[in-house]
Image (tube, rainbow, N blue to C red):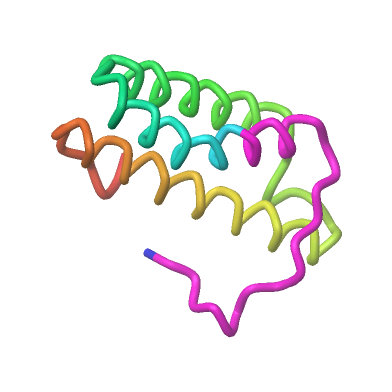
């Protein structure tokens, strides 16, 4: 499920865990480019594991549905959707099937 662009709110980063997750997601193009020249395909699996750890840490540190600030809630929901999409792309590149629901 994707959030339509017209529903996206201005994005806010309030916690270090959010920033860490954003940085990790931003690394994917560079990781793929490096793999294309170095043929070190195992790095993609390591990246997927690091991204999953960053998502877990974010989820543990940043409340989403229980906060009263609606703008911050929307930002965190957008971040979760983005992480889901990027992790899905990473798993696709690895040839690993993914579940729609957990």
Q: Is residue 50 above or below residue 59?
A: above
Q: Left or right: 20 with respect to 80? A: right
Residue displayed at 58% across by 32% down: 24
The residue shown at (53%, 35%) is 27
Disc tally is 0
Counting from the top left corner in percent of width and height, residue 98 is at 22, 40
x and y percentages locating residue 93 in the rendered image: 22, 38
Task: Describe residue 9's horizontal placement relative to residue 15 as left or right.
Answer: left
In terms of depth relative to the viewer, which is nearer, 53 or 40?
Answer: 40
Q: Is residue 45 above or below residue 10?
A: above
Q: Nearer the viewer, residue 80 or 36?
A: 36
Q: Nearer the viewer, residue 79 or 100?
A: 79
| Quarter of the figure with the C terminus | top left
Quadrant that contains the N terminus = bottom left
Q: Residue furthest front?
A: 37
43 magenta-colored = no
Residue positioned 52% across, 21% down in the render: 53
Residue stretch rendered in magenta on the structure = 2-23
């Amino acid at each position: 499920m994707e959030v339509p662009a017209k529903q996206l709110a201005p994005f806010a980063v309030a916690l270090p865990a959010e920033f860490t997750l954003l940085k990790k997601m931003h690394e994917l193009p560079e990781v793929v480019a490096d793999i294309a020249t170095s043929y070190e395909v195992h790095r993609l699996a390591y990246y997927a594991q690091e991204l999953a750890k960053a998502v877990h840490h974010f989820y543990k540190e940043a409340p989403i549905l229980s906060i009263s600030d609606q703008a911050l809630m929307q930002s965190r929901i957008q971040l979760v959707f983005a992480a889901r999409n990027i992790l899905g792309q990473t798993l696709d590149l690895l040839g690993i099937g993914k579940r729609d629901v957990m």
